[in-house]
Image: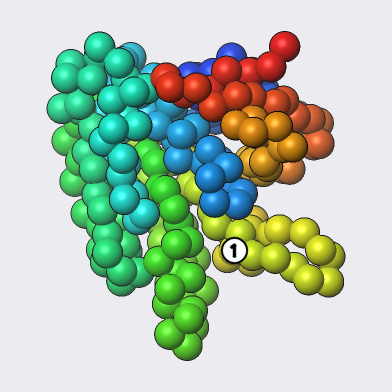
Amino acid sequence: MKTDRRSSGNAALDQLLGGGLEVRTITQFYGEPASSKSTLCMIAAVTCLRAGHTVVFIDSEGFSIERFRQIAGTDTEKIADRLFLFEPIDFEQQGIMIAEAEKVLKTHKPGLLVMDSATALYRNDLEKGRDSIQMLTRQMIQLLGYSKRYEIPVIITNQVYMDTIKNTYLGLGGTALEHISKVIIRLEKTARTGFRRARLVKHRSQPEGASFEFEIVEDGIRAQE
């Protein structure tokens, strides 16, 4: 059975993903700050909007209208009315807005749901001494339910922490986020300024470890030949 996929908006990323973003599935991007997680989310959102679909975009870190305009270019005004933006200010409100997002999914023609970042507000809760892993798991299960119910891809971004034993960055949320994300891509900074690497960490049909390097440009990213 051929898996239904939607373009991520970048040919090199589509190839890494085996043809694009898989519907009925959560795809996770994780990496250090400024590793281009939000840029990849916006490229995918703009691509979906240009195709005539609605995009639900839940942004817990502050949506950059300027960056959206750079990527959308002359299409900005034409497609902006199909972008439904939710901006929670704390982890509890994040859960409420995820629930509210279904009203948009029910009444419009959804093509994509983005959660950028799934763990920024969760991390703040942990710092307050709260055990929030169960709440995070419930939120992610709800997003997975939307992906299946409305036949759309879901993208989440994830923050990282330094594992001092392994001496490497790992995604927050532990096994909960790892298991619920069927596709995981790690975004890494490279030695060259302005360049990043996208590396496939988890995929059910593509070789793990595959990667490509890209440059951050005004209207998105440019893959290196």
Residue at which label 1 appears: 172
User: Which residue in the rendered view is the most extreme toward the right?
Assistant: 166
**How far across and how far down the image is residue 35, in percent?**
58, 42
Q: Would you call the spot at circle 1 few (<14 residues within 10 Å), some (14-19), or many (20 or more)?
A: many
For this rendering, which residue is in front, 18 or 58?
58
Q: Is residue 29 left or right of residue 54?
A: right
Q: Is residue 85 left or right of residue 186?
A: left
For this rendering, which residue is in front, 102 or 159?
159
**How far across and how far down the image is residue 69, in percent?**
28, 25
Residue drawn at 83 percent across, 71 percent down: 165
Residue drawn at 42 percent across, 48 percent down: 116
For this rendering, which residue is in front, 27 or 12?
12
Q: Quadrant of residue 190?
A: top right
Colour mode? rainbow
Residue drawn at 61 percent across, 59 percent down: 160
Q: Of helix, strand and loop, which one carries label 1? A: loop
User: Which residue in the rendered view is the most extreme toward the front?
Assistant: 193
**How far across and how far down the image is residue 99, in percent?**
27, 57
**How far across and how far down the image is residue 41, in percent?**
44, 35
Residue 18, compared with residue 102, is above or below; it is: above
Quarter of the figure that contains the C terminus: top right
* Picture mark count: 1
Three-letter amino acid code of the residue under disc 1: Leu
